[in-house]
């Protein structure tokens, strides 16, 4: 278990230190085995058994819920899943200590109003988790732009292998921002005594921020779809050109096929069959036919 005390700053607290506003990181096992006296504990344990999305639910003077925050590095690499239990004077974050400590350590550098409630601090924690998301989405947009520019020159190899991770990242972020927006809206409209009027404004701002990020993700998904259609168009154009070349080649050699068919017949009185120069003459005629066809095709831009 890791304990923090919230005042004008967030600081680590020692075991046995009481009073004030407390934030604690506990594992699921520690919450199950050692944290006693928490109302609605059965509901919290049920939430912890299904930590797959963001939600918040008031239970009288308590707020319970879960968070699933995508881990954003070069790509979305898994999720940080945790539960939270907010009551008067205490906020439990239930999950892995290493994942949950990082945003709290960043918040230790911030200064807070002495009147800040734990609900307001929880909103600040949500804000810290989304603080650099706009930069991440900007990086995704630049990667898609580079991919689009690459299509203008030539068709890249393993195009879909590069496209699928971006699509998977955007799907995960779309679900996360949609859930986060709904959760913040529900907290803003909550009648819980833990949520003050200034906290409602903060949750409203966070919901708007999640909506803006959601809109950015949706525009990137449309951009990705455009790039995929552009790639497919390039593939279709290349295949069409190949089919055109094959059709022209077939047309060029079609008269030769006709000549070969004639002279392959078993007739004894065919023209030039017994002439000494019949074979070279046929070769010359065939070459002339091919050259004339090539000139005609190039003149009409068929080749």
Image (cartoon, rainbow, N blue to C red):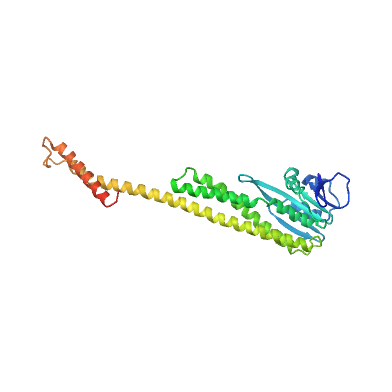
User: Where is residue 123 shown, x and y percent of the image?
Assistant: 74, 56
Q: How many marks?
A: 0
Check the picture and name the quadrant holding the N terminus. Answer: top right
Describe residue 20's horizontal placement relative to residue 292 as left or right: right
Q: Residue furthest top?
A: 276
From where the camera sits, is residue 225 visible?
yes
- Which of these two is toward me, 203 or 34? 203
From where the camera sits, is residue 265 visible?
no
User: Where is residue 279 shown, x and y percent of the image?
Assistant: 16, 37
From the viewer's perspective, is residue 147 above or below residue 63?
above
From the viewer's perspective, is residue 186 above or below residue 45?
below
Which residue corresponds to the image point at 51% horizontal and 46% vertical from the top-left?
160
Describe residue 174's horizontal placement relative to residue 283 as left or right: right
Which residue corresponds to the image point at 60% horizontal and 58% vertical from the top-left?
215
- Which of these two is toward me, 274 or 187? 187
User: Where is residue 95 shown, x and y percent of the image?
Assistant: 75, 47
Corner quadrant of residue 284: top left
């Amino acid at each position: 278990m890791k304990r923090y005390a919230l005042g004008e700053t967030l600081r680590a607290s020692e075991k046995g230190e009481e009073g004030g506003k407390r934030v604690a990181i506990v594992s699921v096992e520690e919450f199950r085995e050692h944290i006693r006296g928490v109302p609605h504990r059965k509901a919290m344990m049920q939430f912890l058994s299904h930590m797959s999305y963001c939600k918040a639910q008031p239970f009288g003077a308590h707020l319970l819920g879960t968070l699933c925050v995508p881990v954003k590095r070069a790509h979305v690499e898994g999720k940080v899943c945790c539960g939270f239990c907010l009551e008067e004077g205490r906020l439990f974050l239930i999950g892995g200590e290493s994942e949950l400590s990082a945003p709290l350590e960043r918040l230790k550098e911030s200064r807070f109003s002495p009147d800040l409630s734990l609900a307001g601090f929880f909103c600040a924690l949500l804000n810290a988790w989304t603080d650099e998301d706009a930069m991440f989405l900007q990086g995704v947009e630049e990667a898609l732009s580079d991919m689009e520019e690459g299509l203008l020159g030539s068709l890249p190899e393993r195009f879909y292998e590069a496209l699928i991770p971006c699509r998977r990242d955007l799907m995960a972020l779309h679900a996360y921002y949609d859930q986060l927006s709904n959760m913040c809206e529900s907290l803003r409209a909550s009648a819980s005594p833990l949520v003050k009027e200034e906290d409602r404004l903060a949750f409203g701002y966070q919901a708007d921020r999640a909506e803006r990020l959601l809109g950015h993700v949706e525009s990137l998904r449309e951009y990705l779809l455009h790039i995929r259609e552009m790639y497919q168009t390039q593939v279709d154009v290349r295949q069409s050109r190949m089919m055109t070349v094959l059709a022209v080649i077939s047309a060029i050699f079609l008269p030769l096929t006709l000549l070969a068919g004639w002279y392959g017949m078993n007739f004894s009185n065919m023209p030039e069959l017994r002439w000494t120069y019949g074979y070279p003459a046929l070769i010359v005629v065939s070459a002339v036919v091919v050259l004339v066809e090539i000139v005609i095709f190039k003149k009409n831009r068929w080749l």
